[in-house]
Image (spheres, helix red, strand yellow):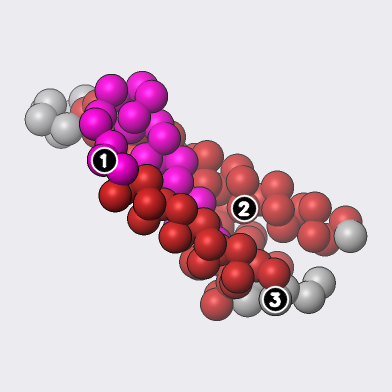
Amino acid sequence: MQIHLLSSLLILITVGLNTLAQFLLKLGSGQNALSLYLLGGILVYGLSTMLYVLVLGKLNLSVAYPVVIGLTVLSTTVTGALFLRENVAMTQWLGVGLVLSGISAIASGVRL
């Protein structure tokens, strides 16, 4: 139970950092290479990668990768819509829903 909670927490933090890195990189796009947004995005990605390695130490790659990437798809789509005012089409939301269905199927078979 404690390992499951720690793994879940590490996954959520990794996804949060991935999303923050994407957001910062988007804000820094089109600016010079020394933009604080770009540098911040790269730094946050580095931290996210280190935490992801911890996730890989606790879960199979066949579970960790799709769960982290799928949840990152969800969170970056929501972040783009809410904070960047990006227009997300209904078919994109349908795709996000399908990704979540896939994550559920993958995660439901995990035995800790």
Amino acid bearing label 2 = Ile
Q: Is residue 25 left or right of residue 34?
A: right
Q: Tell me the SS state at disc 1.
A: loop
Closer to the eye: label 2 or 1: 1
47, 10: nearer the viewer: 10
Judging by the rendered image, the residue that carries numbered circle 3 is 109
Q: CA distance from mark 2 to mark 3?
A: 17 Å
Label of residue 75 in the image: none
Which quadrant, please, contains the C terminus?
bottom right
Which residue lies most toward the right here? 1
Judging by the rendered image, the residue that carries numbered circle 1 is 89
The stretch of residues the image draws in magenta is: 67-90
Q: Is residue 43 left or right of residue 68?
A: left
Mark 3 nearby-residue class (10 Å; few <14, some 14–19, many ≥20): few
| x then y, percent, for residue 74 | 45, 46
| x then y, percent, for residue 56 | 60, 68
Which residue is drawn at the image coordinates 52% and 47% (left, top)? 15
Closer to the eye: label 3 or 1: 1
- Does residue 5 lie above or below 88 as drawn? below
| x then y, percent, for residue 37 | 29, 26
76, 39: nearer the viewer: 76
Amino acid bearing label 1 = Ala
Which residue is drawn at the image coordinates 50% and 51% (left, top)? 71
Amino acid bearing label 3 = Gly
Label of residue 11 in the image: 2
Q: CA distance from mark 2 to mark 1?
A: 27 Å
- Number of marks drawn: 3
Residue 46 seen in this snapshot? no
